[in-house]
Each structure stands twice: as structure tokens, then as C-alpha cells.
Image (tube, grey):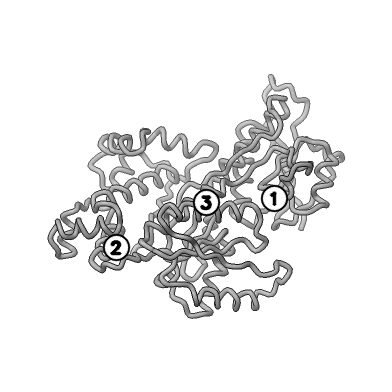
């Protein structure tokens, strides 16, 4: 695969001391959403603070460093996956930012452990995954890690398990096969057998979307119903991969674009001599994009389950507790008591929680006005939404949007939904 080198045609400002534009090698996979997000963030920084010359090689994890001296390279941002790449990067003696180092690479004495690092807050990812599955009312949980059980996969498992333990649950773990055995047929049969004996219904967290899709394929092979028996949640929110899954897969979304932007800013500061050793940039999880693979209300009380489903389908319409009670056909007091016992929240709190998630989503992912968001989320007007939002988040909607979208541009006109319409 040929590499792609980019050079901006814009002129550097006259007061910038550089005699020529800096050149940066980006050894980041273009085949995965998190890699593409990082690259989008770097490009956005370059557009605002460049010009830079950028080297990108399309493909997966296997990347090749260009001849940096001949090319005139000044810096590197790289996911370092092989001893050959490690040796080549260190030999350049150029400023380099590593992406998600492995456990052995972080060990004392390893020269990579001294590099600045861009990495996903995988522990927070695991906690967010647990909270999403807990909200479904499930009482059984499982985890399927990355095949090589790398550090970020372990961190996701730890965050997931620690959050579940707070509620008195312990996740079941899939024992990984030999990573050298790349026969998916054997692995699928093994995974299907493990899924078949799990207690049902179960919430299953997969370390990444690719692994989550493999879980869905194994469920299909074993004739296990998703989400009724196994609710599956991945990570990365690779929209094409998630939507092409059967059924469409829910996923934890990562703010990789913001991470890439901040990594580029860090590299710029290194050139200016304004950075200490071993600085880190975190890629934070932002929210769960809920699709059909976790669209289940696993509550034993059928009336409460029906109330939950009604609330989740209508929370962004102007409904009240009275509407829920009328839909279910029980007395308000009886339904309120049973709902709180099963869900650990009142009906009113559940409506407010889902409306808040929708408002946050629209603030992050669109450039809609506050008035338009208020109308979409069933608020009387933008002024009332602003006061209500500040009571719940301790920020104004504008402050929240600025905080969440720093380093990336909201997608104009995009109107994502919390869940699929029935």
C-alpha cells in the first residue's frame, strides 16, 4: 500500500520562526474508527496552526516509517506494534508520541516508556459500559477481551468489573484462545459454546467493535437471541461496522478526534521546548450509542418493564408520569413503588435522565441552536432548557458544548437518536 503525504498550500504566518514547514509521520491505522478519529484531530490542528507536511499510510496496524532524514521529518505520532518500528522510531531521535503503549512497552527500562503517550482512558470506558448494561435491569454480566489481552483490554475489563462489583455483581470472563491460532472457524465454535452456557439474560461487554461483531456472529451460529438473551455492547462506535452487524450493535463512543488534536498540540509544544518528559494525552469515552443489540428491558416485573419501554420510546416527547401510569393501567402509587424497587429510580427521574442524555447528545454532535434542541427534546423553550440543564450538569448548554467539542467540529445538521425508532 502506498503512503500518502500531504503538504498544505497555506503560508505560515510571517512572525513564526520556522524556516520551513514541519513534517510529521502519522503511523496510525486508517482501517479503524479510533485511528481515523486521531487522524481527523491531527488534521484539524494542522489546519488551524499549520501548515504541516503529513505522512499517512492507509491500512491496519502494520505501518512503515518513511525515511525521515531524506523526507525532512520533524516528528512522529505512532501506534508502535513491532520491534522493527520501535527500532526505527528510536533511531531517528526525533520527538515522538506513542499511541496506547502495551504493558511490556511501559515496563521500566524499556525506552518507549519514556515517550509522551496518547491513550484511551480504558478504565473509564469499562465503567461506562457497565453503567449502560446496568441500566437495562440485567443481573448477569460477561466480558470478552481483545484476543491478545493487551493492556487497554485489561483496563477495560477492570473498569467494567469494578463498577459491577459496586452493585454486587461479578462478570464472567471468556478465556482467550492461543492468539497464534488464527482460525476463526475454531474460535467461533469455542465462543458459541461459551455463550450457550452463560446464565440468561446477560449483558456482554466486548473490548472493541471488531470483537463485539465476532460475538454477534457466534450468537447467530449458536441460535442465541440478541438482545433478548445476550445484550452486546462494543467500543469505538465504528458506525459502518456497527450498523452492518446483525443486529446493529451498541457501542461506547470515544473522543478520538479531540485526542488527536491534543496530541498534535503536544508535539507542537515539544518543538517549542515547553514540555516535560512523559506527558500524556487522554482519549475519553463520551457516551454509549444505543442500537438494537442492547434494546432490552431485563426487568422481572412485566408492568415495570412495559413502563420502562414506554418511557424510553417517548422520553423526548412531552410525556409526564401521568402518561406512563395511564399507559400501564395501574394506580400511580402502585406503579411508582414497583418501578422504584426494580429500577432504583422514580419514573420522573428516568424521564429526566433520558431527556438529559438526548440534550447532551445533540449538544455534542450537532450545531443546532439551543431553541431547536429544546424543541427536539420536549422542552417549552431554550430559556427553560438552559435553567434545567444547569441544575443537572452545573454548566450552561453552551459551556457543555464548548467543553465537549474542543478540538473537533460538531457535525452540522446531524440529528442522532438515543435509540432506534420502533
Disc 1 designates what residue? 103
Q: Tell me the residue at 74%/47% (across/down).
A: 105
Which residue occupies the foreground of this view, 377 or 132? 132
* Residue matched to label 2: 309
* Contact between labelled residues 3 and 1, with CB atoms less than 8 Å apart: no
Q: Gap in Å between the C-alphas at discs 1 and 3?
A: 17 Å
Tags 3 and 2 touching, CB below 8 Å: no
Q: Is residue 23 left or right of residue 352?
A: right
Task: Rate crowding at label 3 as few (under 14), some (14 to 19) or many (20 or more) other CA atoms within 10 Å.
Answer: many
Residue 128 locus on image (x, y percent) = 47, 51
Q: How many marks?
A: 3
Q: Nearer the viewer, mark 3 or mark 2?
A: 3
Q: Residue at x 29, y 63 (%)?
A: 309
In this rendering, does residue 24 appear at all?
Answer: no
Image quadrant occupied by the N terminus: bottom right
* 25 left or right, relative to 405: right
Q: Hey, which residue is sitting farthest front in the picture?
A: 168
Marks 3 and 2, how far apart at CA: 28 Å
- Residue depicted at 46% across the width and 52% down the height: 163
**The C terminus - image quarter:** bottom left
Residue 71 position, x and y percent, is 83, 40
Q: Please give left or right for residue 325 compared with residue 72 in the image.
A: left
Residue 139: quadrant of the picture: bottom left
Say what secondary structure mark 3 lies in.
helix
**Looking at the image, do the residues carrying marks 2 and 1 touch, with CB atoms under 8 Å apart?**
no
Q: Position of residue 54 (x, y in %)?
A: 72, 42
Left or right: residue 290 versus residue 341 is right
Q: Is residue 273 among what the camera can see?
A: yes
Q: Which residue is mark 3?
A: 159
> Which sits earlier in the primary sequence, circle 2 or circle 1?
1
In the current view of this chain or complex, which residue is farthest to the left?
331
Up/down of 31 relative to 111, above or below: below
Amino acid at each position: 500500500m502506498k503512503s500518502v503525504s500531504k503538504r498544505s498550500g497555506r503560508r505560515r504566518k510571517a512572525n513564526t520562526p520556522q524556516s520551513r514547514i514541519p513534517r510529521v509521520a502519522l503511523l496510525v491505522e486508517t482501517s479503524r474508527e479510533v485511528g481515523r478519529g486521531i487522524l481527523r484531530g491531527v488534521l484539524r490542528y494542522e489546519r488551524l496552526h499549520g501548515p504541516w507536511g503529513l505522512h499517512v499510510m492507509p491500512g491496519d496496524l502494520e505501518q512503515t516509517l518513511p525515511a525521515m532524514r531524506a523526507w525532512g521529518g520533524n516528528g512522529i505520532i505512532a501506534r508502535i506494534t513491532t520491534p522493527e518500528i520501535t527500532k526505527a522510531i528510536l533511531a531517528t531521535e526525533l520527538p515522538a508520541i506513542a499511541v496506547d503503549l502495551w504493558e511490556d512497552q511501559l515496563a521500566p527500562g524499556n525506552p518507549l516508556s519514556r515517550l509522551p503517550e496518547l491513550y484511551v482512558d480504558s478504565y473509564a470506558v469499562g465503567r461506562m459500559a457497565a453503567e449502560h448494561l446496568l441500566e437495562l435491569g440485567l443481573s448477569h454480566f460477561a466480558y470478552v477481551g481483545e484476543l491478545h489481552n493487551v493492556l487497554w483490554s485489561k483496563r477495560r475489563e477492570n473498569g467494567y468489573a469494578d463498577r459491577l462489583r459496586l452493585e454486587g455483581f461479578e462478570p464472567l470472563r471468556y478465556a482467550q484462545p492461543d492468539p497464534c491460532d488464527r482460525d476463526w472457524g475454531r474460535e467461533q465454535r469455542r465462543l458459541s459454546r461459551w455463550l450457550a452456557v452463560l446464565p440468561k439474560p446477560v449483558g456482554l461487554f466486548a473490548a472493541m467493535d471488531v470483537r463485539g461483531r465476532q460475538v454477534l456472529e457466534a450468537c447467530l451460529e449458536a441460535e442465541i437471541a440478541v438482545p433478548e438473551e445476550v445484550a452486546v455492547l462494543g467500543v469505538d462506535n465504528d458506525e459502518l461496522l456497527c450498523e452492518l452487524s446483525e443486529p446493529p450493535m451498541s457501542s461506547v463512543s470515544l473522543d478520538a478526534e479531540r485526542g488527536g488534536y491534543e496530541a498534535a498540540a503536544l508535539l507542537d509544544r515539544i518543538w517549542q521546548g515547553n514540555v516535560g518528559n512523559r506527558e500524556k494525552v487522554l482519549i475519553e469515552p463520551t457516551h454509549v450509542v444505543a442500537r438494537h443489540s442492547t434494546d432490552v428491558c431485563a426487568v422481572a416485573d412485566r408492568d415495570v418493564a412495559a413502563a420502562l419501554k414506554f418511557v424510553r420510546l417517548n422520553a423526548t416527547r412531552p410525556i409526564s408520569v401521568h402518561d406512563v401510569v395511564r399507559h400501564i393501567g395501574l394506580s400511580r402509587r402502585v406503579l411508582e413503588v414497583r418501578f422504584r424497587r426494580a429500577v432504583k429510580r422514580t419514573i420522573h427521574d428516568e424521564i429526566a435522565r433520558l431527556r438529559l442524555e438526548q440534550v447532551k447528545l445533540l449538544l455534542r454532535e450537532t450545531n443546532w441552536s439551543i431553541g431547536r434542541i429544546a424543541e427536539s427534546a420536549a422542552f417549552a423553550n431554550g430559556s427553560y432548557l438552559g435553567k434545567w440543564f444547569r441544575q443537572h450538569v452545573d454548566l450552561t448548554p453552551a459551556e457543555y458544548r464548548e467543553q465537549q467539542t474542543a478540538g473537533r467540529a460538531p457535525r452540522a445538521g446531524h440529528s442522532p437518536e438515543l435509540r432506534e425508532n420502533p
